[in-house]
Image: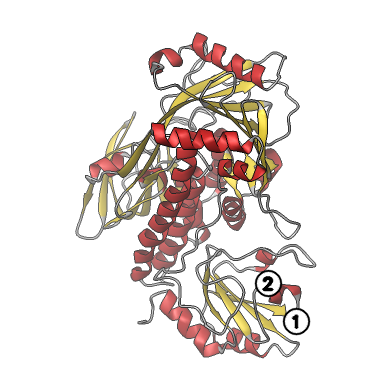
Amino acid sequence: MGGAVVRPQGRAETDSLYFSYPHFDAPQARQTLSDPARVAIVGAGPVGMTAALALAHEGVASVLFDNKATFNDGSRAICIARPSFAILDRLGVVAPFLEKSLGWTTGRSFYQGRQILEFEMPDSAEEKFRPMYNLQQQYIEAYLWQAVAASPLIDIRWQSEVTGLRDTATGLRLAITDPNGSYEIDTDWCLACDGARSPVRKLRGKRLQGQNFEGRYVIADVQMEHDYPTIRRALFDPESRPGGTVLIHRQPDNIWRIDYQLRDDEDESEAIREDNVRISVQAVLDDIGHKGPWELEWWSVYSANTLALDDYRDGRVFFVGDSAHIVPIFGVRGLNNGLADAANIGWKLGWVLTGRAGEALLDSYSPERRGATLDVFDNAAKSARFMTPSTHGWRLMRDAALSLALDHPFAGNLANPRQMTAYSYHDSPATLPDDPRFSDGPLPGAHVPEMRMESGFLSDRFGAGFTLLCFEDTQEDLSKQVRTQAPEGISVVTLPYPSTLASRFGATSGSAYLIRPDLHIAARWYTAEAQNVCDAFSRLTETQER
């Protein structure tokens, strides 16, 4: 878990070298503050704002509370994965992210100054977005806030702290305190997006369970002119940190993130003193051959944990993002996992509140997203053990692998951080069993693959709700039938057969894929009939018994 952000002496908490933090007042008009809300969202970080936008996308209003007066200070989470960009695109807010962020595909690992690995993340011209983008969290929050502020369905209240939360006969009642007074508000549902130290989690008497890792890192941002490309660098046992690990990422505005591991015998309070941070950063810059000037932006200290709630739902409260789980930074899964949480609960709760789905659909949130967290834990724990060996035995094995990689390239793959990919909901109650006649193509539960088309990309043709992809010859019989019989909420897209696209989906003429609003495959049929599609849609939205 991360510590407090520290800035150089003489600079205020949000006095940045490159970013101007806005100031948000607490609500001034008090007459309607206690009006009931359909959904209350606690925490206006990236996850909370994404959840609010996902609900607004479904036509549902929400009230968004945050106890701060501005965005989170410090760049914090900086890596946004391809599936997250797909979420932002789906919500119609991706444009400023694409304009500002730095896309990347390559990572390099070094041991004792020698390169032992260069990996390429899967990418091709068929993909709409790059595998990873670097962008400071201040910008992530600023761009989301622009969309939130423009939405008539989102009421955002800054400097508003949730001090109480209790069940009522029909929903929940929140107690709110801001600089201008206190009040209570009734809501049907609450999304706790209030971070690792979640006050809502404490109010509900919930505790995270899991594993703590021993490794501690100082995270520092520096501003400098440095011509190295946007490539993730990992330095094992460098001269600057003998026996330790250093990570380096490029960010916009000539900002470079440097994470360096503390030795077991280093005192944390001494390590984060400004003079010691400057000495350590300079040593890292010497390692990478940077001879020019640099300025220190901010720093913090971090320790790796894999912690989660046993259930992400407590009655009418859903835990989303870091309030539900804490994951190590290795593999950049924290923010991305949280955004996927927000998209998942956003469309489901939106469909329930607009009457398009039964309330039982909400039962799929926790198994889907907790399953995704456990998958993240499995991969992140492997990375964490390699980056910060927790025992003498792990360190011996890690160092042996690194030494072997100096002369044998295959061993370098052990230093691969196992990049972020979308989790598959193959065993979810909101995913139907597969059609056994398929011999190829993506399975139900998987994130739908992207594909370049004559005009744009496949995902550009998806509707606002569910989308049925029909693979047909020129007759389009299935498409016509579904368009005639399908309930509101299904858009039909006809795709040619035979075609490269059909081959990728393992489809024949008459095959169909039903895609959920969050771009995961809900069901597929090798030869579909309109009635089968309609029945499956009813089962998936819990408006018909399975």
Depicted 438 relative to depicted 274: above or below:
below
In the image, what residue occupies the spot 44% across and 21% down? 263
Q: Position of residue 302 (x, y in %)?
A: 44, 29
Q: Which residue is at the far left?
A: 169
In the image, what residue occupies the spot 43% across and 37% down? 394
Residue at mark 2 to residue at mark 1: CA–CA distance: 11 Å
Q: Which residue is at the far right?
A: 454
| Secondary structure at numbered mark 1 | loop
Query: Seen in the image, is 147 located left or right of residue 164?
Result: right
Q: Which mark is residue 504?
A: 2
Q: Position of residue 267 (x, y in %)?
A: 39, 16
Residue toward you, 402 or 173: 402
What is the three-letter code of the residue carrying label 2? Arg
Residue toward you, 31 or 415: 415
Q: Which mark is residue 309?
A: none
Q: Position of residue 220 (x, y in %)?
A: 54, 23
Query: Seen in the image, is 88 located left or right of residue 128?
Result: left
One can see residue 1 in this view: no
Depicted 499 relative to depicted 172: above or below:
below
Q: Position of residue 180 (x, y in %)?
A: 33, 30
Which residue is label 1 attached to?
498
What is the three-letter code of the residue carrying label 1? Pro
